Amino acid sequence: MGIPAARAKAFVAHQQAVQDRRAAKVKPAATSAGPAGTAGPPAHSEAAGPKAGPTAPPATTGASGGPPPVPLPGLSEAEMQDAYRCYLEAHEKAGTTASPPTLSKLRQRLAKQLPQILSANNCSRVRLEIALDDGKVRLRAWPVSEK
């Protein structure tokens, strides 16, 4: 077809993340109803093994009971949490040997990069996107133009 493999992989990963987010919106009601919780983990543990993707972000949400995280410019807390969850899922699906950075480490990186992106593009919001490039998971911030 003439589509680069990296671009096709990124598209498939994005579509899978969208599908997972839709399933996650329905799943909390189903898993909270029963104490066994057998319906939730098998859906994400197919390729991941013992690691469960949806359980990792809530564990790292708070800084170990410390103060709430500093807000990132141009990005809401919900968007950051959602992007990190998708980032972890992409790492699991990609099967990379390197462990993904923690939420706090990712926040530190974004805290440095987002102000530059916002000022260079003269905008006040960004959109985070997860992409696979040559087997590596990338987090990309795209400026959002307000019209």
Image: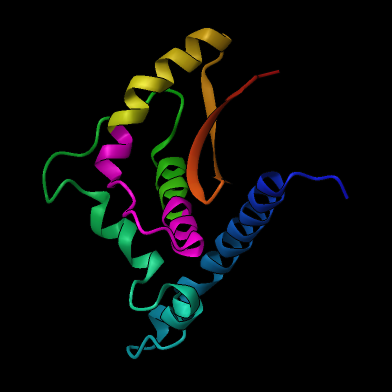
| Residue 96 shown left or right of residue 134 in the figure | left
Image location (x, y in percent) of residue 93 = 50, 64
- Front residue of this view, candidates 98 and 101: 98
Q: Residue at x 46, y 83 (%)?
A: 42
Image location (x, y in percent) of residue 5 = 70, 49
- Which residues, given as a range, are shown in magenta? 86-107
Magenta stretch encompasses residue 88: yes
Could one spot residue 114 in this view of the protein? Answer: yes
- Front residue of this view, candidates 77 and 94: 94
Above or below for 95 versus 78: below
Q: Quadrant of the C terminus?
A: top right
Q: Residue at x 31, y 35 (%)?
A: 107
- Front residue of this view, candidates 79 and 30: 79
Q: Residue at x 45, y 63 (%)?
A: 95
Above or below for 48 versus 74: below
Q: How many marks?
A: 0
Q: Main secondary structure of the magenta part?
A: helix
Could one spot residue 71 in this view of the protein? Answer: no
Quadrant of res 41: bottom left
Above or below for 57 versus 32: above
Image location (x, y in percent) of residue 103 = 30, 45
Magenta stretch encompasses residue 96: yes
Colour scheme:
rainbow
Q: Residue at x 42, y 72 (%)?
A: 48
